[in-house]
Amino acid sequence: MSGTSYKGFETDDVDHFLKGGGIDTDREKEIGQHIGYRYDVNLLPDYKRLTPYLKKYMEFMGWTDLNWLEDVHMGYEEGKPAVFDRNINGWVSIPETMELPDNQQDRDMVARELLIKFQMSERHPLVQLNQAYKKF
C-alpha cells in the first residue's frame, strides 16, 4: 500500500486522520495545535450562522464566502477565550463580560467578527505603527 502525504506529514495508515488527533504537519507543529477541518468537514463555516456584521462586511468586500476568515476560529490562551491575529502574531482576548454561544460554529463567527473589528480599531498595533511611521 502506498503512503499518504499531507503538507509535511507522511503516513502509511490511510485512517490516520480519522483515528489520530495529534499534531502532525509542520504548520500544526509551528502553531501548536491541529488544524481541525482536515479531519472534520463539520468545522467548515455554516453560512446560515453568519452574524449580521459579517454579512454586511462580506457584501461590502464583494466576497461570496468568508475568504481568509475561514481559517479564523475561537481558541484559548491561558484558559481564556481568544482569537489569533496573524498580523500581530498574537492572541486577542475576548472580553470577559461577553457571553459566548454554546455552539463552536457560532463562537467561530463571533471570533471572526471581533477580529475584524479589532484590526480596524485604533487599538490595533498596526494602526499605531502606521500613525507613527507614515510618510504622508
Image (spheres, helix red, strand yellow):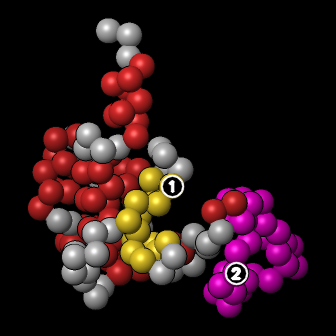
Asked whether residue 133 appears in the rendered view, the answer is yes
Task: Between label 2 and label 1, give the one nearer the viewer.
Answer: 1
Residue 45 appears in view: no
The C terminus appears in which quarter of the rendering?
Answer: top left
| Residue occupying the point 30% across, 44% down | 123
Q: Is residue 74 rendered magenta in the image?
A: no
Quarter occupied by the N terminus: bottom right
- Does 66 appear above or below 32? above
Q: Is residue 90 above or below residue 100?
A: above
Residue 27 part of the magenta-drawn span:
yes
Residue at x 78%, y 70% (from the top left corner): 4
Q: Position of residue 95 (x, y in %)?
A: 28, 69
- Tell me the residue at 22%/76% (across/down): 97
Spot the residue most to the front.
132
Q: Residue at x 69, y 86 (%)?
A: 20
Rendered location of residue 68, percent (x, y): 41, 50
Provide the secondary structure element on which disc 2 rests: loop
- What's the magenta region? 1-29
The residue that label 1 is drawn on is 90
Residue 18 quadrant: bottom right
Give the CA separation, mark 2 to mark 1. Answer: 23 Å
Q: Is residue 112 left or right of residue 44?
A: left
Residue type, label 1: Gly
Q: Label 2 belongs to which residue?
A: 22
Q: Label 1, secondary structure: give it.
A: strand
Instruction: Give the left or right position of residue 50, taking residue 66 as reference.
Output: left
Count of marks overlaid on the render = 2
Residue 83 image position (x, y, % from top left):
41, 64
